Amino acid sequence: MAWMGSGHWSRDAMTSQLGVEANTSYSAIDAAWPGTLPKLNKSCVDLAVRTALACGANVQSFSAFDRKHYFYADLPAGYQITQKYAPLSLGGEVRISGSFGEKTIRLQQIQLEQENLKAIDLNRAGSALMELVSYPDMRSPEEAAAYVKTLQTLLRTVGSSDANMEQGSFRCDVNVSVNRPGDPFGTRCEIKNLNSVGFLITALNAEIYRHIELLDQGNQVIQETRGFDENRMITYKLRSKEDAPDYRYMPDSNLPPLILTQAYLQSIKAFLPEHPDHLRKRLVEQYGFNQQDVNVLLSIDAGRDVPFDGETGQSAVSFFEETVKGRNPKTVFNWIVNELVAQLVLHKRTFGQSPLSQAQLGDLIDLVETRKISIFINVEDCIKGTAAKDILRHILRTGAIEDIATLQANLGLMTIDVADVRMFCETAIGDFPDVAERVRQGNKKVLMKLVGAAMKLSNGRADANLVKTCLEDILIHRTI
């Protein structure tokens, strides 16, 4: 189940928020006050349709809403609005991959639902949900985990949900059954509300073991709904499994059927972003990336490093592609992944909110590549801040909009000439005579200590390669 970030089921004015103070973000409709009637939020329909199209599902021109009745404290109205009999879409598929190889998981349907509340907190009540129902195509906890991760990436790519399991905007209900090879499926049990991939794997392994143990002892598996104890790492019984008649499904008389025209579907399809499967393949072919590099970029876009902002306009991939033009892809990749992402996380910004423009990052990389600004990979005793990185951090901290050359001059980070480099090298040799002597005797491994010392003396403004060459000329080649 995916919680859609565009607001509540029944309103456009108030946006749903996770993590805010209890009972501060809900309406009279959500609380089921007498006299209130539900109204469908068009934005929620748009996001659900985007998801369905991205999964290759058949979006239905006619879908309808039903009431699912049950008595529990998390349901103010005594029923949940859902789409039992005429869902938003049918079919579709999600392709997953992992150590098990590649596999296609079929979707049965995608339906719109109304969220219930959380304990005594009404904020979540009435929020719009999508429930993606899959066929029983998964055969291991690893496949289930890969399916969940792939769905998270897909939902975030199309912008329909941030799919954050820890905050509760993406949850899994998993059906488990065990059978011997060649036998039909066994009795299934449902584990409710798993809120992390790690807990998903642990819960499935625990439940599979429980089924096997029961069957080996000659006992029967009882169909039931179970929860997962995160402390004891076991599943436990919640209630006997209800079937459809127990919920007394009936059409919702307050909501008319949802009619979607082909023109509407085409308008949604026209603005769908590139599918993650296509994007993954294109990045490999166009930029020569390996799968690990692609996974890193896509994981950033999935919000695991940089906060998700609900937008599909600016992302790690799009930022990379706008910066890389005419430059080495691996160099640009390293700057984004190793430097920019860390600063975005530090300042709690998304790529769309980054004050560092693609043009600024491109200019910074060009100056580094032409050695007009220094950069140094940290070694023992070397300063951690270098000129290039200092400029990047300055922009993220202050939002400076000047060009890189101007910032370099204003911040006093201009590179120094050969004469100054030699002076810093000689000072470093004088400060560490024992290290210098070991280099003279052929121990090049300790040379980097002197490089770090000289770089430190230059406040990171010297070119590290020039420093290294100068030290080698003084101590080894004795040419200067």
Image (cartoon, helix red, strand yellow):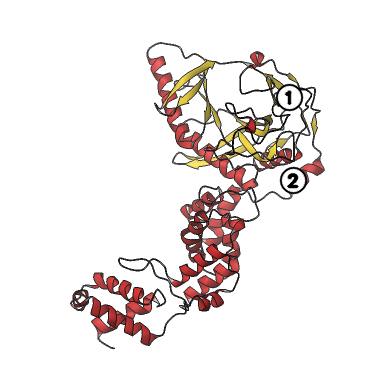
Dot 1 lies on which element?
loop
Residue drawn where x is 50% and y is 21% of the image = 226
Reading the chain from its start, which is encountered first: label 1 or label 2?
Answer: 1
Q: In the image, what residue type sits under mark 1? A: Trp
Q: Quadrant of the N terminus?
A: top right
Residue 39 picture quarter: top right
Q: Is residue 179 visible?
A: no
- Which one is in front in this view, the residue at disc 1 or the one at disc 2? 1
Identify whether 472 is placed above or below 130: below
Q: Residues within 10 Å of mark 2 (few under 14, many from 20)?
A: some
Between 350 and 49, the one nearer to me in the picture: 350
Viewer-side residue, 92 vs 191: 191
Q: Position of residue 471 (x, y in %)?
A: 29, 80
* The label number, if any, that marks residue 268 in the structure image: 2
Q: Amino acid at mark 2?
A: Ile
Q: Is residue 475 above or below residue 229?
A: below
In the displayed structure, does residue 215 sit left or right of residue 423? right
Q: Percent position (x, y) of residue 244? A: 65, 16
Residue 243 visible? The answer is yes
The answer to whether residue 86 is left or right of residue 200 is right
Coordinates of residue 234 in the picture (x, y in percent): 42, 24
The quarter of the rendered structure image containing the C terminus is: bottom left
Front in this rendered view, residue 236 or 32? 32
**Which residue is nearer to you in this view: 60 or 281?**
60
Residue at (50, 42) in percent of width and height? 97
- Which quadrant of the structure image shows residue 361? bottom right
Q: Judging from the image, what secondary structure is the residue with disc 2 in? A: helix
Q: Residues within 10 Å of mark 1 (few under 14, many from 20)?
A: few
Residue carrying label 1: 33
